Image (cartoon, helix red, strand yellow):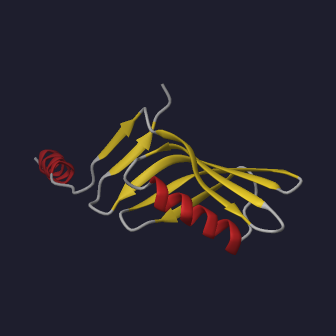
Amino acid sequence: MYKYLLITLFSAQFSFSQVSMTTYKYGYNGMELIVKSKNETIIISTFNSKKAIKDEIAQKVYDHFKNSQINSGDTISIQGNDAKVTGKCFISRKKKLISINFYYEKIEWNNGSIELYKKT
């Protein structure tokens, strides 16, 4: 009897939870931001992004790059107005050109849903 009560409670908890997790296979890829100064040119590209937030997240990746130490291959989280995005950041430098490629891995929307990028 006790087993059935626990199973019923756990089932109810899972069925009424607010978090929904889905995967997506296709996102937007491209250069989102180019910043030029006298000393350098920085290009921010995003991969597997969602159209609604790609520009804002690219700007915040640039801000994060300028204000903290990021190494190539680091996983970083960026908080936007509509979602928190977690992904890998790859940085390459050639003389005065810096290329920052940010690959979305997980999007945690403010409404509680979570989207994970899944390679095909």
Query: Which residue sits at x=10%, y=47%?
Result: 1
Q: Nearer the viewer, residue 9 or 81?
A: 81
- Quadrant in the picture for residue 53: bottom left
- In the displayed structure, 2 sits above or below 36; it is above
Residue 36, image quadrant: bottom right
In the foreground, 55 or 115: 55
Task: Residue at 59% x, 62% y: name it.
Answer: 61
* Residue 60 % position (x, y): 55, 66
Q: Position of residue 42 (x, y in %)?
A: 72, 58
* Left or right: residue 13 compared with residue 117: left
Position in image of residue 93 (x %, y %): 83, 52
Q: For this rendering, which residue is in front, 77 or 50?
A: 50
Asked if residue 39 lies left or right of residue 51, the reply is right
* Residue, far top: 120
Q: Residue at x 52, y 55 (%)?
A: 86
Measuring 42% from the left and 32% from the top, which residue is drawn there? 25
Asked if 3 appears above or below 57 in the picture, the reply is above
Badge count:
0
Q: Position of residue 13 (x, y in %)?
A: 18, 54
Q: Where is residue 66, by image quadrant? A: bottom right
Seen in the image, is 73 located left or right of residue 55? right
In the image as oriented, which residue stretches furthest toward the bottom?
67
